[in-house]
Amino acid sequence: MDQIRIKQKNGSLLQRLHSNLFQRLLKDMRKNWILYAMILPVVVWFLIFCYKPMYGVLMAFKDYKVKLGIMGSPWVGLKHFQRFFHAYNFKLLLRNTLWLSVYNLLVGFPIPIVFALMLNYLKNKYLKKTVQMVSYAPYFISTVVICGMISIFMAPDTGIFNTMRAWFGAESVDFLSKPNWFDDIYVWTGIWQGMGWSSIIYISSLAGVDYELHEAAIVDGATKIQRMIHVDLPSIKPTIVMLLILQMGSLMSVGFEKVFLLQNNLNKSAASVISTYTYEVGLINSDYGYSTAVGLFNSVINVLLLVTANQIVKKFADESLF
Amino acid sequence: MEKSMERKIRRSYSDKIFDVVNLLVMIVLLFVFVWPLWFVVIASVSDPHEVWRGNVVMFPQGFTLNSYKELVKYTSIWTGYANTIFYTVVGTLVNLIMTVCAAYPLSRKDFVPRRFFLWMFMFTMYFGGGLIPSYLVVSSLGLIDTRWAMIIPGAISVYNILITRTYFMNSIPSELQEAATLDGANSLQYLLKIVLPLSKPIIAVIGLYYAVGHWNDFYTALIYVYDKNLMPLQSFLRDMLMSTKLSLSNLTGMDAETVARKMELAQTLKYSAIIVSTVPVLCIYPFIQKYFVKGVMIVSVKG
């Protein structure tokens, strides 16, 4: 009896809470109707362009027919996923996607930090400003132009890299048609384009490091390199950790554009990743259900990676995104 | 005493080496950043034959503006240019209106469903439907092959909403709102007359983020636009820069020498096309880069 009464009591409490929230909303709507009117188009946009496609993900489990629509098409369970896992290029795609990201992370993550640290100790303020400004510039150049420049500079015979090889008597290499050069080209040109920009956030947090710590270190006889390691790095650790988690989360989302643009028939074994594959089977071959399944596989792994990275960091470094 | 002196000397010695190495690395880096851009500039005004032979390294050789004159004849590039200007201006305007409409209510502490909407927006940063479901939505709205396909599907960036919201919350004192309410202003009047004028720096920053995004956008057109008359500059640039094949039909009946000249000119055409398409961004860049940097800082402060 008592238990039932408690249950009833709880129920009514919950109901009261519900109606409370509802009433609060109604009251707020009357008071702040302008705010609701403002945010309405934004919410509609998110529903149409973000949440409706999420519902469309159901296609990954269906034999999608345009005429039948998403609801009407028959379920096929995990057929598309099995097809992908057994595809002849599954391993290749997975390996390329992971390798390009891991390589990019291993090299591309520390370099902006080192760059920011070194820039921070540059004595000549004028040079410091110049280097900073010039290093941001490539970030604003479009991917198409960057890839165009890559193909010019990497061109056989006439490109600068081959001209330089010629100075040392080495023979000309057609870099862009060699699969084994693709990852280096992809990663290092990415660093050229992005390192200045990625370093801004570190430069700004280095500017916030307490100078008293440096003075104390100087009194203790620390060299500049020692100050970098024992004063600067620990001070900007939270920033580093935050960016690392974010990067881990996008480990599987290799930028589509650059791989797509640099791809050709000769280097394709290295220059095809999951995102270019979804484009190929989806938009070129119109294999909608399958392409959606491949894309879903990719984004689920992404979310898992993000959550795992966040969890790991939370445990060991006491920092987290959420 | 002596020991600390010794330590000081050792330190200054180590620091000196460090300073020299640091200076050298920075100068090399400066060169690495500048040279590729510089090369494109000098190659575009050099004699195509000299560029072909690899003689153009630091300075233009056989100065000529032929490649620019040739580029003027490429009408498709100019169609793309006009389209891109349209997409950038209209697109950025739409972006800014939508972003303010999202960020302002979210910045108000008395807006009850604030948390819910924030989560609803932020969730899309981590998970999305993917290429085909999005394509089908855009297609079902009849946007494929229209100018709106370049503007509406990318109308909002959650990241920019977050930056703007943070700015509204941290940089505009809430007392102002109380004062405005006392004076009988409603939320819209307060936003237009007080918040926005005070938020010029952040509006400039995200406006520039969006504008550069539109200018450089190649992906949207690849997916949603197939009509040549609607294509943006980047699509034409891609055809020009990434294709090595020449239209051979124009070359038949020419002797080898003329063909070679043609090919060299086609190569330098690439350089002038890069310059013409990138100059608008790089020209305004020195004036606005401090705003861009400010934008990144706002995010980093937010953490």
Image (spheres, rainbow, N blue to C red):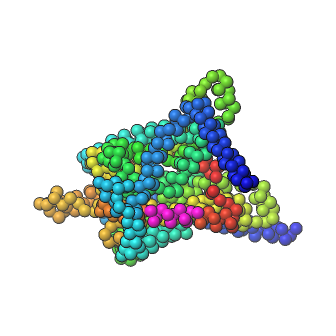
Q: How many marks?
A: 0
Q: Looking at the image, can residue B241 be seen?
A: no
- Who's the residue at 70% across and 62% down the image? A318
Determine whether A296 is above or below B224 in the image: below
Residue found at the far bottom of this picture: A170
Q: Quadrant of the N terminus of chain A?
A: bottom right
- Who's the residue at 61% across and 30% down the image? A31
Question: Relative to the observer, which residue lies in front, A232 or A130?
Answer: A232
Residue found at the far left of this picture: B253
Determine whether B71 is above or below A171 in the image: above
Say whether residue A304 is magenta: yes
- Who's the residue at 52% across and 43% down the image? B206
**Bounds of the magenta span?**
A296-307
Say which quarter of the image contains residue B161: top right
Question: What x and y, as percent, mark residue B239?
Answer: 30, 56
Residue found at the far right of this picture: B1
Drawn side of residue B274 relative to residue B197, left or right: left
Question: What x and y, as percent, mark residue A130?
Answer: 56, 52
Drawn side of residue B24 relative to residue B155, left or right: right
Q: Quadrant of the C terminus of chain A?
A: bottom right
Question: Relative to the observer, which residue lies in front, A308 or B228?
Answer: A308
Q: Looking at the image, can residue A29 be seen?
A: yes
Residue found at the far top of this picture: B183
Question: What x and y, as percent, mark residue A11?
Answer: 66, 48
- Who's the residue at 42% across and 41% down the image? B91
Say whether residue A160 is magenta: no
Question: What x and y, as percent, mark residue A125?
Answer: 63, 52
Question: Relative to the observer, which residue lies in front, B265 or A40?
Answer: A40
Q: What's the magenta bit mostly, secondary-structure-wise?
A: helix
